[in-house]
Amino acid sequence: MKILRTVRFPPQIGGLLRALSEVGFFDRSLLIGSWVMPLYRELYGVHYLLRTLDIDFAVHLAHPQKQMRADLERVITDLGFVGFMTAGGIQKFTAAGYEVEFTAHRPGGREIDVVAIREWNINALPLPFVSILTGFSETAKVEDFTIRIPIPEAYFIHKLIVASRRRTVEKREKDLEQCTVLIPILSDNRLHQVVQAQRIAKPTRRSMTRSCDAIAFPLQRLFS
């Protein structure tokens, strides 16, 4: 485990991450989304200007627990966050402009609106390809707590896939920008490991091809 000495999160986010770590959330689940970039900066020298108030987590569901392990709803609201439900029934939390959301892997072909996570007393947004992130992760120590994040190669491949599926140009460009800044630190061996662990259908490969073309990344680095 690497110890990160220069990463400093805003108080609301640092307190949230520490609280989740203390109840064991990061034993299997991850911080995902743009807030992994400050950790990549110290771990790998990635330079990226963070521009988001969204804090996203991926819940690992390979071995779901029927009994509650910790009441995350209470843990998070005790920190001053306010919980609310979206129109689609997804649970989120907000404080100081930040918005917290949990996601979980959605198997292909299954349309599910919400996933109830009894282990943590929350619900999550089911999305395809989240297992790419949860299947390839690493841990680091930040200040006095441990956090789990996707390895850069998994993050990169996930963004390649979802970028072309985005509904807005802004989000698509943000995904591709993050892919671009990760290119210098990517390991071909780990790229191959991540790709080979997936069942990549033709539409998914087309999405990856479009994204690779957009950032001038050689597709053969993924499939050679």
Image: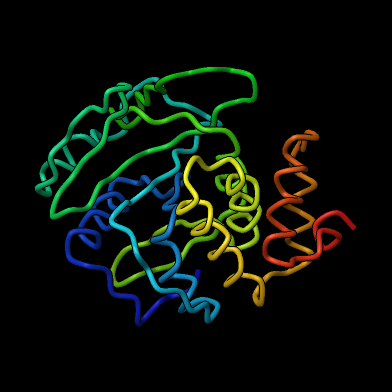
Q: Which residue is more in the foreground, 200 or 26? A: 200
Q: Which residue is more in the foreground, 210 or 16? A: 210
Q: Quadrant of residue 13?
A: bottom left
Rendered location of residue 124, percent (x, y): 38, 30
Q: Is residue 55 above or below residue 217?
A: above
Left or right of 170? Residue 208 is right
Q: Is residue 90 above or below residue 205?
A: above
Rendered location of residue 154, percent (x, y): 63, 54
Q: Is residue 202 above or below residue 213?
A: above
Rendered location of residue 59, percent (x, y): 44, 38
The total number of labels drawn is 0
Which residue is rendered at x = 57% and y = 48% of the image?
Answer: 133
Q: Give the quarter of the figure containing the C terminus.
A: bottom right
Q: Which residue is more in the foreground, 138 or 164? A: 164
Which residue is rendered at x = 32% and y = 53% of the image?
Answer: 21
Rendered location of residue 157, percent (x, y): 66, 53
Colour scheme: rainbow
Left or right of 120? Residue 45 is right
Left or right of 26? Residue 21 is left
Residue reaching furthest to the front: 169
Which residue is rendered at x = 78% and y = 33% of the image?
Answer: 201
Left or right of 209? Residue 115 is left
Q: Is residue 20 above or below residue 143?
A: above
Q: Quadrant of residue 92?
A: top left
Which residue is rendered at x = 51% and y = 32% of the image?
Answer: 127
Q: Which residue is more in the foreground, 142 or 209? A: 209
